[in-house]
Image (cartoon, rainbow, N blue to C red):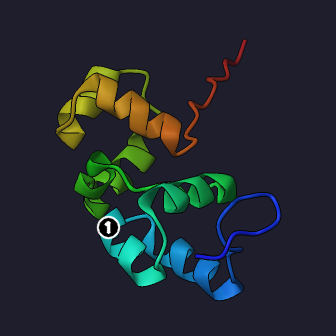
Amino acid sequence: MAKNQRGRGRRWTDGEVALLKELYPECPLPEISKRLNRTVGAIENRAHQLGIKRKTYLDKLWTAEELQLLRELYPISNDIQYIAKRVGRSPSTIRAKAHSLGFVKRRRTYDL
């Protein structure tokens, strides 16, 4: 592999970056490495520079129905235990997922 002037590996092409963005979230790193003819370390470094994240195991486990229920209940209910029971997840998982999705609680307004 030819090195550039700074002693690093070859530059990433636009096509390689596009393929990395497509594959990195779910594809095994050794497979990406083989397809791009780059080391796993180079792939991880470039993905980090581009802000590309891998999907976590728990992200794959949430169903559309669970997410919809969380989307409906989280903003209006102050009872995390209730939401957890309805969704079928632990309260800490509910909080973490709601936070990762940017959900916020609505503030109650009181008439005086």
Image location (x, y in percent) of residue 9: 64, 66
Above-or-below relation of 28 to 58: below
Q: Which residue is mark 1?
A: 30
**Residue for point 58% across, 53% down:** 45
Determine the residue located farthest toward the right in the rendered image. 5
Question: Looking at numbered disc 1 in the image, what kind of residue is underneath it?
Answer: Pro
The quarter of the displayed image where residue 3 is located: bottom right
Residue 101 visible at all? yes
User: Going 82% across and 65% down the picture, which residue do you hit?
Assistant: 5
User: How many neighbours does mark 1 have within 10 angstroms: few (below 14), some (14-19), or many (20 or more)?
Assistant: few
**Percent x, y for residue 92?**
32, 23
Quarter of the picture containing the C terminus is top right
| x and y percentages locating residue 4 in the rendered image | 76, 69
Residue 49 image-quadrant placement: bottom right
**Outermost residue to the bottom:** 15
User: Which of the pair 80/107 is nearer the observer?
Assistant: 80
Question: Up-down: is 55 above or below 13?
Answer: above
Pick the quarter of the image with the N terminus.
bottom right
Q: What percent of the width, then of the height, locates residue 88? A: 17, 39
Which residue corresponds to the image point at 58% horizontal and 34% vertical from the top-left? Answer: 104
Give the quadrant of residue 40: bottom left
Element type at mark 1: helix
